Amino acid sequence: MRPDKQRAFLLRRENKSYNSIAKILSVPKSTLSDWFKKEGWSLVIKKRLIKKQGYKSRIKMKGLNAIAKQKREALYLQQRQTAYAQFRQYKNQPLFQSGLAIYWGEGDNKLENGIIRVANTDPFMLKLFHKFLKTYLPEIGDLIKAYLILYPDLNDNTCKKFWSAIIRVTPDRFLKSHYITGHHPTKRLPHGICTIYISRRAYKERICEWIELYKKEIRAMRV
């Protein structure tokens, strides 16, 4: 048996992987595979190494997930602290109060999904909420999207143009429209239902914190 092959067998019996042996002996992994393919004991070692590597990968992934979670929580805390600091500045402004009232009553309040979403048929309400977002969360920028819920006899492009002009979201920022199917396929609403949509948990943290502070202000008034 050639010396490097003999040495490879000794290293393999020490539970060395193909990568380790190839690095030590400067032997291609394809050669090692050919040497060991008929060795049952080597296959046992291979399975053991794969299991061990899988365990290490899971541990590493858990560690990375924990670090990512810590970073997210730090970001969310920062957003809540920013909301608290800004609330005193904004709380008496009519647009700010209107935006919070709209989201409190009409918005998606489930914080965990990270989606800022308000759906309505009232053009003025959605226009007002869009202005609220652009004024008090200007960093949202192009994250604002929209989508429509329509009856089958409503024209998708026509309705998108209508709502685009109202909420100042360009048609290319509209997601795919959803069509209502059921016993009444004809239009009940001339332009359907429009939804303003932003997928960003950090900004939702700020809005939800503003709403909680707003609630406290109202409770203090003993309404």
Image (spheres, rainbow, N blue to C red):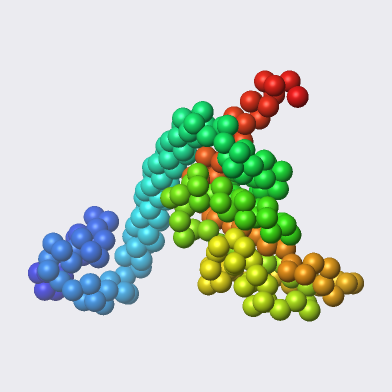
Residue 88 at what x, y percent from top left?
A: 51, 28
Q: Nearer the viewer, residue 156 or 36?
A: 156
Residue 115 at what x, y percent from top left?
A: 58, 52
Q: Quadrant of the C terminus?
A: top right
Q: Nearer the viewer, residue 169 or 47?
A: 169
In the rendered structure, the answer to whether residue 192 lies left or right of residue 64 reads right
Q: Is residue 76 visible?
A: yes
Q: Is residue 66 visible?
A: no
Residue at 27% across, 74% down: 33
Q: Nearer the viewer, residue 91 or 67?
A: 91
Residue at 36% across, 66% down: 43
In the rendered structure, the answer to whether residue 37 lies left or right of residue 158 reads left
Residue 189 at what x, y percent from top left?
A: 80, 67
Residue 13 placement: quadrant: bottom left
Residue at 67% across, 20% down: 220
Number of numbered labels in the structure image:
0
In the picture shown, does residue 92 fall above or below 4? above
